[in-house]
Every structure is written in C-alpha cells, then in structure tokens.
Image (tube, rainbow, N blue to C red):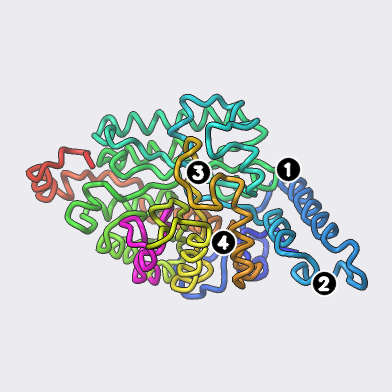
C-alpha cells in the first residue's frame, strides 16, 4: 500500500543528517526529491494509526476474495472506490484554495465543527472528502483594494482564521512549516496554511510582507499588484519582492498574472511556484488559467498548478461544467507540465446554492473526482502526488530554498520609490494611486 512519504515519486530516504538537495539540484534531477523533516514522537504514533486504518480498508476489500493473499497489489483485489479510500488514508487532499475566511465573521467555529448546512464546506464534509490540508485564501473584496483598506482587511481575515482554528482544535491545526503539515495530517487534523494574500495587500512594502510572514502567511498572489501587472511585466521592485518571498519561505502564487510577469518570475525564482486556483487555458480561455507555455515552464520549475473547480475556469462550450471537465483540465496539466506539477483547488467556502461544477457541489466530493481519474488510467502514484505529494513538496522545497537564501542575504530594505521611481510616477499619472491594485 502507499506509504506516508509526502512525495510519492521520491527515491529512498537520504542518510540521517544529510543536507537536503537544493531546489536547483532537483531541477537538474527531477526524479529525486528531499525527504520530509523528521517527525515528532506524537506524529510517529499518529502515523501508525493512519497506516492501521488504511490497512484495515485494504483488508476489508480483500476479505472474501478466494485464493488472494493480502500481499498482492491493492489495485488487483479491490474496486475503484476502495482504491480511492486506501489512497486518501495515506495521501489526503492538500487543497490549494479555501474561500471560507471571508465568511467566518458570521459562522461560529462550533458550526463548522459539527456541520453547517448554509455553506458548501465544514469539518464533516472535509473529512468525508479526505482533505488533510488547505490554503486559506486571504483575498480581500474589491472595494477594500486600496492600500490601507487592503492591509487592514487582510489582517482581519488572518485574525478570523486563527480564531476559528483555535475554536476547533480537534479538527484544524494552524501550520507554519512542512513538518507541521505532516504532523497535523498524521494526527487527523486539517493542516491550515494562511494565504495566498493578495499582492495589493502588501501595500508596496517589504516590511508588510515580513509582518505577514511573522503572522503565519505562507503564500502571496502577485496578480493585481501594480509592480507585477500594470506594465505587463515584473518591475524592479517586483523582482525584489519575489527575492524576499524566496528568502522568507513564502510560496509565490502566479494565478492570474500576465504572461510576461509569469515568465520573469520563472526566470528568477529560486524556489518552486504555484498557481493556487487555475486551469488549462487551452481548454477554457479564462484570464486566471495557464497557457501551455506557462505549464511547460512550470514543469521545469517543479512547481504545481492547483486545478480549480470554479465553473467559469473549467467550463467548455455547449455543456454545463461538470466533474469531467475538471478531470479534463487535470489530464491536460499532467500531460503538459508533468505528473509532479498538478494539484487540486476546490475553492470551497461559499454559501449553499453557489454555482458549482456538477458532481463537485461540496467539499465531500473529492473521492468522486479521484475515481474518475483512476478510471482514466491514472496510477496510484499519480493520484498520491495529485492529492498530497506535489503541493507538500512545493511547500517543503520553498523552505529549503529559504534556508539557503538566508545564509546569503538579510532582509531587504528596498522601497518601491527607490527601485521604481519613474515607473511609479507614470502609474500614478495613469490613475494608479500608491498601493492600489
């Protein structure tokens, strides 16, 4: 059966005490991946429980199969639904985009813990869907996009998520490192990562970026920031912001960025990037989706495209969006970028009745999508990477890159006025007030 390693494509663990390989070394040897950090005694004990549960599912699937031993491959003795349950027991879903933070102000933690019919996600449905980790999107409403409003609105969202996690300690756990993520998963908690934060919510300040990191933010979206979007490429300050994210260990989210900006980031990034909620533009022409050129660059970067379930990002002409359309996007991303670069982004966290792809109406439906992919010929290793391994590796590799960067440089004190003085003035003339999106 599948084991508990974060990366299903990884080779045997490295020797104890050996320094994990750099991101650059992995790019040269894509079949190798660093092993996850040592687990705590608590994590190890909980991991044994997860293994036992998964083995119980396999045993249940094999009981009554005359002449078949428990040593044969799971896929030979159980059906698709049982295969999905076995895979999710060891490799739960690592979701790239939960929009629930925006609704937490009117949803008490206990309602999420025991079930909330007014929403499309809660703890019981996350458990039913096999979700073990998720990024909590900290996107602020458009009317709060001005500099000071965006910062204060983002801080309020962070406060809401942290309060919710504290109110559901048996269900959620706030995590800051890849080791924390593994520990939370092995103990049956949904690992909760803060981010992505909107680029405009940085207020054009690297000090604000560092403050977000200190509060637990681990991903930032570049789209919408004037130093990333206005001239269609990354400004000098934008380059410095990406370098500082790499130094801190913040994952760079390229969802919705323009082609030139995306290419500039791929050229300079010292860590893998992600598209937190995107699809394949070749299938659905949506500005948040990724072109085939972008997916090819993502494959070389060893990042991850978290394929969105949002109807407008996966819809195809002539039919209502459905689970099969999401599967088509996943197939395309896997074909162009590679199996190591594809993940899931349910985008749940909306009120009941919000339009959804047919078959993926709430957070309990991930197993249905995985069953569809298995029927299409995805291997167990492909599914394990899709659900958990690929996203967990990007977080882990971003940490390793940050350790290296911190040995070479300290916190940047650069300002947008120093680096983009003339460009910033032109943007203000074009109607972009300082710090706005």
The stretch of residues the image draws in magenta is 274-296
Please give the name of the residue rendered at 53% of the width and 50% of the height, measured from the top-left corner. 95
Which is nearer the N-term, disc 1 or disc 4?
A: 1
Secondary structure at badge 1 equals helix
Alpha carbon of mark 1 to alpha carbon of mark 3: how far? 30 Å
> Is 293 within the magenta?
yes
Alpha carbon of mark 4 to alpha carbon of mark 3: how far? 18 Å
Q: Quadrant of residue 354?
A: top left
**On-image quarter of the N terminus:** bottom right
Secondary structure at badge 4 equals helix
Q: On residue 230, which mark appears?
A: none
- Residue placed under numbered mark 4 in the picture: 386
Disc 1 and disc 4 in contact, CB within 8 angstroms: no
Which is nearer the N-term, disc 1 or disc 3?
A: 1
Secondary structure at badge 3 equals loop
Local crowd size for mark 4, using a 10 Å CA cut-off: few (<14), some (14–19), many (≥20)? many
């Amino acid at each position: 059966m599948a084991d508990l390693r974060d990366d299903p494509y990884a080779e045997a663990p490295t020797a104890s005490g050996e320094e994990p390989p750099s991101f650059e070394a992995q790019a040269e040897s894509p079949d190798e991946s660093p092993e996850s950090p040592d687990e705590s005694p608590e994590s190890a004990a909980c991991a044994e429980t997860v293994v036992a549960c998964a083995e119980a599912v396999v045993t249940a699937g094999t009981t009554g199969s005359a002449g078949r031993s428990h040593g044969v491959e799971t896929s030979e003795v159980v059906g698709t639904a049982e295969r999905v349950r076995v895979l999710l027991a060891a490799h739960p879903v690592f979701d790239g985009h939960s929009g629930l933070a925006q609704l937490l102000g009117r949803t008490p933690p206990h309602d999420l813990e025991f079930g909330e019919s007014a929403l499309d996600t809660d703890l019981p449905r996350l458990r039913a869907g096999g979700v073990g980790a998720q990024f909590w999107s900290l996107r602020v409403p458009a009317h709060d996009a001005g500099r000071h409003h965006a910062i204060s609105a983002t801080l309020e969202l962070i406060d809401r998520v942290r309060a919710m996690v504290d109110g559901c300690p048996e269900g959620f756990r706030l995590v800051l490192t890849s080791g924390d993520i593994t520990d939370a998963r092995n103990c049956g908690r949904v690992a909760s990562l803060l981010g992505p934060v909107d680029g405009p919510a940085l207020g054009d300040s690297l000090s604000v970026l560092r403050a977000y990191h200190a509060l637990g933010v681990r991903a930032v979206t570049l789209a919408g920031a004037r130093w990333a979007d206005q001239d269609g490429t990354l400004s000098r300050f934008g380059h410095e912001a990406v370098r500082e994210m790499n130094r801190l260990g913040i994952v760079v989210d390229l969802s919705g960025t323009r082609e030139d900006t995306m290419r500039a980031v791929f050229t300079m990034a010292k860590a893998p990037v992600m598209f937190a909620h995107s699809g394949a533009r070749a299938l659905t022409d949506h500005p948040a989706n990724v072109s085939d050129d972008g997916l090819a660059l993502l494959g070389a970067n060893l990042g991850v495209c978290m394929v969105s379930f949002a109807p407008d990002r996966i819809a195809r002409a002539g039919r209502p969006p459905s689970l099969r359309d999401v599967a088509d996007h996943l197939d395309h991303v896997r074909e162009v970028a590679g199996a190591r670069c594809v993940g899931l982004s349910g985008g749940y966290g909306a009120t009941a009745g919000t339009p959804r792809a047919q078959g993926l109406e709430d957070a309990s439906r991930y197993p249905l999508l995985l069953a569809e992919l298995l029927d299409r010929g995805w291997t167990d290793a492909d599914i394990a990477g899709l659900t958990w391994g690929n996203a967990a590796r990007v977080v882990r590799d971003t940490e390793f890159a940050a350790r290296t960067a911190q040995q070479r440089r300290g916190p940047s004190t650069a300002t947008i006025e120093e680096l983009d003085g003339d460009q910033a003035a032109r943007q203000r003339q074009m109607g972009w007030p300082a710090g706005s999106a």
